[in-house]
Image: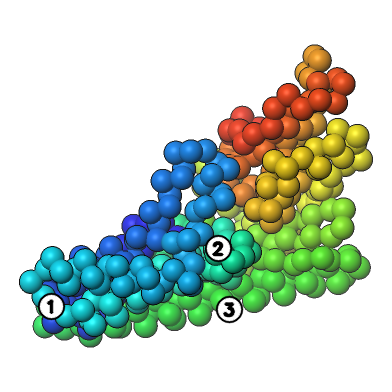
Amino acid sequence: MDTITHGIAGAVIAKAGFSKRLGKTGTVAGVISAILPDADIIFRFFGDEAFLKYHRGLGNSLFFMIPLALFIALIFNRFSKKKAFGLFFLLAILGIMSHNFLDLQTSFGTMLLYPFSDRRFSLDLVFIIDLYYTGLFIAGLIIAYLWKKRGEAISILTLLTIILYTGLCAYNHSKAISLAKDFASNQKLNAINISSLPQPLSPFLWANYIDTEKEIYQGFVDLKNKNPETIKPDTYIGRFKSKFRSPKNVEYKFWVKFPDSPFADMALKLEGLKFFLWFARFPVLIEEKDDGDLHILRFFDLQFSAMEGRYPFLYEVVFNRQGNVISQKFINGSFLRFKGKS
């Protein structure tokens, strides 16, 4: 989840039982504890590969939580006027836990067992930037500051409201994934994996994925709107929402994951592409073309395909005609347009 929401969540946690004893220092400690695991975002400056390899790794590790919380508590207990190491430690642990809890709900993947395992865990409940989530935290924090006498109670109520909202997302997720399972069953698809991922703007918008041995099926559903087909795609948001269909009218498109091609076979053996496949949940070869003496292949993760004109973490492999690798790297894919088959 975005760093701003993490920070606000840390402030609300501090107001929900720590501020009376720790004062403003507690609020600062809560915010820092909640955002510090995102310090690894610095790897963004070293390219997509470094970012994907290390982001949501050590900072989100369950094995690093206690050492990090001890470090935060020691710093605040040493340099603040409030000498309450135990409270600072408890606040830091809760702030770090809130960070992991929020990140785990998104579909990006969080390496909770790092460095002993690079498995990426995700609950697929909330989009990485959720305006409702952030709005609830902001509203609760503002009201708590304006109504200081009830600040603690309001902050606790805010956290309970967040839990209820998460429950709504979990319920919607179960409904969306049931639709995907029904489609797979009706079409007699031999599914390796069936997932439903949260989408921007609403907790009722979902993208369903059915992963088979050779193909990936994708369908967009709006659980709330019984007739979203009437949306006019004459604006950016309109074009985005026009992808979604009512539960009874979900349209699935499919992609052949890796078409038969000697160049594709060679690319799949490369270490760079193996790294891409480690991260990608729904990898497909979306473009293969000749460009003079070069043969270009571009691989993409379909989980990022909902937003028009936005194709992050696109991986390109370039061969010469003799089959030698000229380059392999992540590239900007904003210029591409591709569609699956109905």
In this view, the residue in front, 330 or 151, is 330
- Residue at x 81%, y 15% (from the top left corner): 293
Query: How far apart are the two marked residues, 3 and 2, measured between alpha carbons?
Result: 32 Å
> Residue 278: x and y, percent?
69, 53
The disc, 1 or 3, on the residue closer to the chain's N-terminal end is 1
Dot 2 falls on a residue whose secondary structure is loop
> Residue 52: x and y, percent?
56, 49
Q: How many marks?
A: 3
> Residue 317: x and y, percent?
73, 32
Q: Which residue is mark 1?
A: 83
Q: Is residue 66 visible?
A: yes
Q: Which residue is mark 2?
A: 115
Horizontally, residue 311 falls left or right of residue 36, namely right
- Residue at x 84%, y 44% (from the top left corner): 258
| Residue 91: quarter of image | bottom left
Residue 238 to residue 68: above or below: above
Horizontally, residue 83 falls left or right of residue 216, namely left
Residue 140 to residue 301: above or below: below
Residue 51 to residue 140: above or below: above
Q: Amino acid at mark 2?
A: Pro
Horizontally, residue 209 falls left or right of residue 122, namely right
Q: Is residue 130 visible?
A: no
| Residue 288: quarter of image | top right
